Amino acid sequence: MRGDKATIDHAGFIPNNPLPLTTSMTKGSASSDAVPAADIETNFKPTDLRGILKYIPRFRNQIFVISLDGAVIADDNLANLLLDIAVLRSLMIKVVLVHGISAQLTELAETRNVVISNSDGTGVTDGPTLDLAVRASSRVSHLILEGLTQSGLKCAITNAVRALPIGVIKGEDRQFTGKVDRIDKDTLQHLFAADIVPIIQPIGFAPDGSTLRINSDLLAVKVAAELGATKVIYLSQREGLNIDGVFRRDIAVEELATVLEKSPETINDDVRSKAEHAVSGAKSGIPRVHLIDGRIYDGLLNEVFSSDGVGTLIYGNDYQQIRSATRSDTRFVHSLIRSAIEREELLHRDLSAIEDDIESFFVFEIDENIVACISLHVYPDRPETAEIGSLCVMPFHHRRGIGRKMVEFATLQAKAKGATQLVALSTQSTTFFSRSCGFALADETDLPSSRRSQAQSNGRNAKVLVKSLD
Ligand SMILES: CC(C)(COP(=O)(O)OP(=O)(O)OC[C@H]1O[C@@H](n2cnc3c(N)ncnc32)[C@H](O)[C@@H]1OP(=O)(O)O)[C@@H](O)C(=O)NCCC(=O)NCCS
């Protein structure tokens, strides 16, 4: 669901004077080993534009903190990335850029034959390392300024990060390594108001004006938490999160926190620090953290504007993604369940029937996209019994626990309404209800008489399943 750069430009999304296509339209780089270089063909379709348009009211004025690893800044894809950031700005999304410098610092140290004490701002930063870090940082910021200027965006490097020395940890003096003391929110808000993209270096200033090196992963979540950002997007050289060698497209923060606590070694070590910061960020109220490969052409926009994305989405609390449906969700709910209706998995319901009943629906969203729904009705003639229906999970998201979570959530809602028994009618998913959700096969006679005659007359011959809520 992405358009190529030129065509979006034709549609008028990009501010004047977009970045010229001097870099290749390929992904991969000299330093790349994870992603094979491959030409990416993108053909923009009108449906892509419609797909993006629906996000405009949702994302307008939200804040995204985009954190770019130094290695991503050194990659050929940087020009495309900065152009994607211009697209986000043109959709009225407020963007803050935080950048790393590890790759540049290491390179500078090699060129100058200096032994550095640490490259990523987590260990000891001695005097010579700090000196090189400041140089690497101004070079990286300058590259970003250049790119954003070519994209017609106003931007500014700030001193909005006040830092304090980390001090001595386990007997080791971390010297010029800093932690975030305070983020100057006012300055950043002023920049937003003036339509300026703030660029934040991994360098902070202590109250006495001295300079300290800060890890950029940490900085990104601190800035996001302070600003009440909706997303932190980490762009690195890795596709996202692998746990035990299995790539995860999305993961609840609670699950990630458990893995980090009990078996951190199962997470690929090059994103473990980002995973840790994602968990602490979620605890401070950031709803979503994305880990994506910054070298993928179109990757950033794909991650933001498609439900599947290209990387890993780490999302906040379990039921946070479930909400009551509203009238404006009718079309999405209808298109979600339409194919299940065609396969006779669900009872036929047309658009107007769904619209009339939309208040009985709950929907599950991943990154603003509805991927599952369920309805709940309390029988008017038997208020101690409620029925769940129209349970449907988008096939791409099957077998990730969403169906069960929807049933659990509906169960809580039914209990809250005073029901002591939950009913489900199913033609093809009886095992799901019985094995995975604690329902037992029952008999039509367990239904209230009005519901029984309705079930008998529709010819579906659905099985009746019942669960006690006591
Ligand atoms: C049935 C449906 C809602 C399951 O959603 P889901 O998100 O894939 O299910 P979950 O990931 O929560 O699965 C939980 C468990 O149920 C099992 N399961 C999932 N779908 C199943 C099915 N159709 N039959 C039997 N078991 C199933 C899973 O393997 C998993 O078991 P595990 O915990 O042992 O690993 C989904 O397949 C769907 O939308 N089907 C089409 C519509 C439909 O039939 N709706 C139900 C009628 S109201």
Image (cartoon, rainbow, N blue to C red):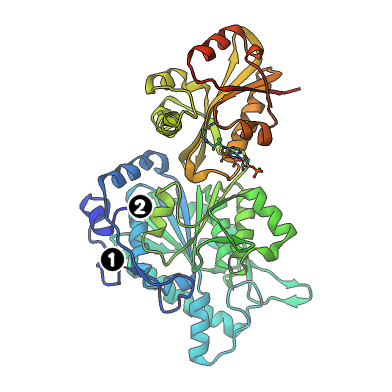
Q: Quadrant of residue 452?
A: top right
Q: Is residue 402 above or below residue 457?
A: below
Tag 2 secondary structure: helix
Tell me if 274 is positioned left or right of 384 in this view: left
Graded by Cα atoms within 10 Å as few (under 14), some (14 to 19) or many (20 or more), the crowding at tag 1 reads some
**Which quadrant of the rendered structure holds the C terminus?**
top right
Amino acid type indicated by mark 2: Arg
Mark 1 vs 2: CB contact within 8 A: no
Q: Circle 1 is placed at which residue position?
A: 150
Marks 1 and 2, how far apart at CA: 14 Å
Residue 246 place in picture, x, y as percent:
59, 60
Tell me if 180 is positioned left or right of 16 in this view: right
Residue at horizontal 58 percent and vertical 82 percent from the top: 129
**Of the pair 442 and 132, the residue shown nearer to us:** 442
Tag 1 secondary structure: helix
Graded by Cα atoms within 10 Å as few (under 14), some (14 to 19) or many (20 or more), the crowding at tag 2 reads many
Tell me if 380 is positioned left or right of 168 in this view: left
Q: Is residue 19 above or below residue 469?
A: below
Amino acid type indicated by mark 1: Gln
Q: Circle 2 is placed at which residue position?
A: 89
